[in-house]
Protein backbone atom coordinates (compact mmCIF):
# COMPACT_ATOMS: atom_id res chain seq x y z
CA UNK A 1 0.00 0.00 0.00
CA UNK A 2 2.89 2.40 0.78
CA UNK A 3 4.16 2.26 -2.80
CA UNK A 4 0.68 2.94 -4.21
CA UNK A 5 0.26 5.91 -1.87
CA UNK A 6 3.69 7.26 -2.84
CA UNK A 7 2.90 6.99 -6.55
CA UNK A 8 -0.40 8.83 -6.05
CA UNK A 9 1.37 11.60 -4.12
CA UNK A 10 4.14 11.91 -6.71
CA UNK A 11 1.50 12.12 -9.44
CA UNK A 12 0.26 15.29 -7.76
CA UNK A 13 3.66 16.98 -7.42
CA UNK A 14 5.97 18.46 -10.03
CA UNK A 15 9.32 16.75 -10.71
CA UNK A 16 11.05 19.73 -9.05
CA UNK A 17 8.92 19.39 -5.92
CA UNK A 18 9.69 15.66 -5.70
CA UNK A 19 13.45 16.30 -5.96
CA UNK A 20 13.49 18.87 -3.15
CA UNK A 21 10.85 17.39 -0.82
CA UNK A 22 10.58 14.90 1.97
CA UNK A 23 7.28 13.01 1.71
CA UNK A 24 5.69 11.60 4.85
CA UNK A 25 2.60 9.44 5.25
CA UNK A 26 0.52 8.65 8.30
CA UNK A 27 -1.02 5.22 7.59
CA UNK A 28 -3.54 5.49 10.43
CA UNK A 29 -6.99 5.31 8.88
CA UNK A 30 -9.19 8.30 9.63
CA UNK A 31 -12.96 8.52 9.32
CA UNK A 32 -14.96 10.99 7.25
CA UNK A 33 -15.84 13.98 9.43
CA UNK A 34 -13.07 13.30 11.94
CA UNK A 35 -11.23 16.44 13.07
CA UNK A 36 -7.52 16.35 12.23
CA UNK A 37 -4.67 18.68 13.18
CA UNK A 38 -2.65 19.88 10.19
CA UNK A 39 0.21 22.04 11.43
CA UNK A 40 -1.29 25.13 13.02
CA UNK A 41 -4.85 24.54 11.83
CA UNK A 42 -7.43 21.80 11.97
CA UNK A 43 -9.79 20.41 9.38
CA UNK A 44 -12.42 17.73 9.00
CA UNK A 45 -11.42 14.65 7.08
CA UNK A 46 -13.57 14.79 3.89
CA UNK A 47 -13.67 11.00 3.45
CA UNK A 48 -12.33 7.82 5.01
CA UNK A 49 -8.60 7.82 4.37
CA UNK A 50 -5.12 8.88 5.45
CA UNK A 51 -2.91 11.98 5.60
CA UNK A 52 0.37 12.75 3.85
CA UNK A 53 2.71 15.63 4.66
CA UNK A 54 5.01 17.02 1.98
CA UNK A 55 7.84 19.16 3.31
CA UNK A 56 8.92 21.34 0.38
CA UNK A 57 11.82 22.93 2.26
CA UNK A 58 13.14 20.27 4.66
CA UNK A 59 16.25 22.18 5.71
CA UNK A 60 14.40 25.44 6.42
CA UNK A 61 13.52 26.52 9.92
CA UNK A 62 10.00 26.56 11.28
CA UNK A 63 7.30 28.06 9.07
CA UNK A 64 7.89 27.39 5.36
CA UNK A 65 6.12 26.02 2.28
CA UNK A 66 4.62 22.59 2.72
CA UNK A 67 1.51 20.64 1.72
CA UNK A 68 -0.89 18.20 3.25
CA UNK A 69 -2.66 15.64 1.10
CA UNK A 70 -5.81 13.96 2.38
CA UNK A 71 -5.99 10.64 0.54
CA UNK A 72 -9.14 8.55 0.34
CA UNK A 73 -9.03 4.91 1.44
CA UNK A 74 -9.09 3.66 -2.17
CA UNK A 75 -6.13 5.91 -3.08
CA UNK A 76 -8.17 7.53 -5.84
CA UNK A 77 -8.95 11.01 -4.51
CA UNK A 78 -6.63 13.59 -2.97
CA UNK A 79 -7.57 16.85 -1.32
CA UNK A 80 -4.51 19.14 -1.39
CA UNK A 81 -3.91 21.77 1.26
CA UNK A 82 -1.12 24.35 0.99
CA UNK A 83 0.34 25.16 4.38
CA UNK A 84 3.22 26.88 6.19
CA UNK A 85 3.72 24.62 9.20
CA UNK A 86 4.63 20.95 9.57
CA UNK A 87 2.82 18.64 11.97
CA UNK A 88 3.66 19.53 15.53
CA UNK A 89 6.02 17.18 17.38
CA UNK A 90 3.32 15.42 19.36
CA UNK A 91 1.37 14.63 16.18
CA UNK A 92 4.16 13.36 13.91
CA UNK A 93 5.22 10.17 15.66
CA UNK A 94 2.99 8.04 13.41
CA UNK A 95 4.34 9.44 10.15
CA UNK A 96 6.53 7.29 7.91
CA UNK A 97 9.10 8.76 5.54
CA UNK A 98 8.21 7.57 2.03
CA UNK A 99 10.65 9.66 0.00
CA UNK A 100 13.66 11.87 0.68
CA UNK A 101 14.59 14.10 -2.27
CA UNK A 102 13.01 11.66 -4.73
CA UNK A 103 14.63 8.53 -3.26
CA UNK A 104 12.96 5.87 -1.12
CA UNK A 105 14.86 5.81 2.20
CA UNK A 106 16.16 2.66 3.84
CA UNK A 107 14.80 3.84 7.21
CA UNK A 108 11.25 5.21 7.15
CA UNK A 109 11.65 6.73 10.63
CA UNK A 110 14.86 8.70 9.90
CA UNK A 111 13.42 12.20 9.47
CA UNK A 112 16.84 13.89 9.28
CA UNK A 113 16.81 16.16 6.19
CA UNK A 114 20.61 16.11 5.82
Image (cartoon, rainbow, N blue to C red):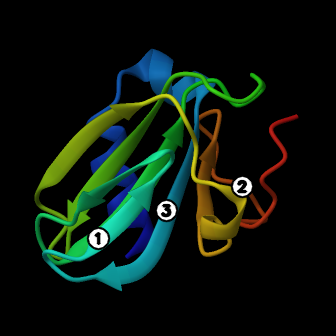
Name the residue furthest top: 16
Residue 73, picture quadrant: bottom left
Q: Name which of mark 1 and mark 2 comes first in the sequence.
A: 1
Q: Residue at x 43, y 82 (%)?
A: 28
Q: Residue beneath label 3, please?
A: 25
Badge 2 density bin: few <14, some 14–19, many ≥20, Cα 10 Å: some
Q: Is residue 14 left or right of residue 86?
A: left
Q: Nearer the viewer, residue 84 or 16?
A: 84
**Residue under the image location 13 percent in, 77 percent down:** 32
Residue at image location 11% in from the left, 71% down from the top: 47
Residue 38 position in % (x across, y down): 43, 52
Q: Please, what secondary structure does the residue beneath circle 3 have? A: strand
SS at circle 1:
strand
Q: Is residue 72 above or below residue 16?
A: below
* Distance of label 1 from label 2 (alpha carbons): 30 Å
Q: Nearer the viewer, mark 3 or mark 2?
A: 3
Q: Residue at x 68, y 68 (%)?
A: 90
| Residue at numbered disc 2 | 105
The residue closer to the viewer here, 28 or 17, is: 28
- Residue 56, image x and y in percent? 55, 27
Image location of residue 60, percent across then percent down: 75, 22
Q: CA distance from mark 3 to mark 2?
A: 13 Å
The circle drawn on residue 35 is: 1
In the image, farthest residue toward the front: 41
Q: Tell whether label 3 touches label 1 (CB within 8 Å).
A: no
Q: Secondary structure at mark 2?
A: loop
Earlier-in-chain disc, 3 versus 2: 3
- Contact (CB < 8 A) between labels 1 and 2? no
**What's the distance in space between the residues labelled 1 and 3, CA to CA?**
17 Å
Amino acid sequence: MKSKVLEKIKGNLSPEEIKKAMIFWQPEKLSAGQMIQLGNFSSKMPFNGTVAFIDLEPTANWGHACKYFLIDENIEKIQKIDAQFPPFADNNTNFLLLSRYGVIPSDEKNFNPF
